[in-house]
Structures are given as C-alpha cells and as structure tokens.
Image (spheres, helix red, strand yellow):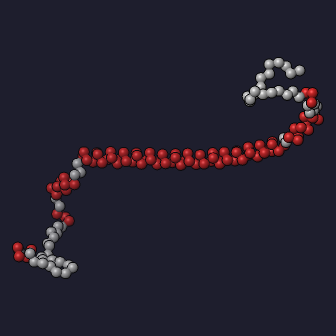
Amino acid sequence: MAGRRNEYVYGNTARALRPIEKEIRSPGRTGAKSHRKINKESGMNPGFMIFMTLAMVLTGIVCVQYIRMQSSLTTYVNTISAMEIELQSLRAENDDYEKRINGAIGLENIKKRAMDELGMTYASDDQIVVYNSDGTDYVRQFVSLE
C-alpha cells in the first residue's frame, strides 16, 4: 500500500484505485435505538425546540411591525403629496386673486374715486410747508402746522 501512495498519476483525471463499498440498509430494519440516536445527533432537545419557537415568534412579530411601519410610511407620504398639491393650487388661486385686486385697484382708479366721490384736490402752494432735515430718516412734529 505504501508503494501505491507514492505513484504519480498523469492526466486530467485520477484513476480509482479501489471501489468504495456502501452499506445498503433495508428501510424496514430501523429500531427504537436508532431513532434515539438520530434525535440525539440532530440536537433536537426540548430546550432547543423552545428556543427555536421563541426565535420564530420574535421574528414574526418583527416582520409584522416592519410591514405596519412601511404601510404607515406610505400613507404619510401619500398624505404629504396630496397636501403639497393642495398647497400649490391654493397658492395659484391666491396669486390670481392678488392679480385681480391689483388690476382692479390701479392708481388712476384711486385718484378718480378720491377726487370725484370724496372731494379731494391737489395741494396748493400755500399749503406746502418746506423744512430742513438734519439727515435723519424721520421728522417729529411738536406743534401744529396750521
């Protein structure tokens, strides 16, 4: 045998030096001892089964909570999108109202209404008071101008 291990094998495949024999069991000949041996070898004791059951339950709870959070997030995103669309339409409507108001109330309309309906007139030269400013942006009036 020692001589066979030192032999070189040339080529891309190795020859089988001797066939491997497999034990063939008949399916009806397994006893109670072999079942106990299989159970011990597979590690399926009650403590492990309880641990695996708790792990599966915990995993299920985590998955359900994740799906609920994803659903609520989708609902919030859709709500925000609807509110943004509503905001855009309200802004457009507000801009339209503002343009209509500014168009309806022009300076000429204000001047005409003030002169015709309210009786206002332009100031005459004797009504205009000239004052010298000391460089500040505002004026304080201490006495009546009349």
Q: Which quadrant is the C terminus positioned in?
A: top right
Apparent side of residue 80 relative to residue 24 in the rendered image (left or right): right
Viewer-side residue, 61 vs 74 = 74
Apparent side of residue 2 relative to residue 128 in the rendered image (left or right): left
Residue at coordinates 80% horizontally, 27% vertically from top-left? 132
Residue at the bottom extreme? 11
Return the x and y of residue 69 as percentages of the image width and height: 48, 45
**Quarter location, residue 134:** top right
Q: Is residue 32 visible?
A: no
Viewer-side residue, 49 vs 122 = 122
Q: Is residue 70 visible?
A: yes
Return the x and y of residue 15 as percentages of the image width and height: 16, 79
Q: Is residue 91 above or below residue 143?
A: below
Residue at coordinates 17% horizontally, 55% vertically from top-left? 37
Viewer-side residue, 40 vs 29 = 40
Q: Is residue 137 above or below residue 16?
A: above
Return the x and y of residue 70 as percentages of the image width and height: 49, 48
Residue at coordinates 16% horizontally, 63% vertically from top-left? 29
Q: Is residue 92 above or below residue 129?
A: below
Residue at coordinates 20% horizontally, 65% vertically from top-left? 27
* Count of labels in the image: 0
Residue at the top extreme? 143
Apparent side of residue 34 relative to residue 96 in the rendered image (left or right): left
Return the x and y of residue 18 as percentages of the image width and height: 12, 76
Residue at the left extreme? 2
Q: Which quadrant is the N terminus positioned in?
A: bottom left
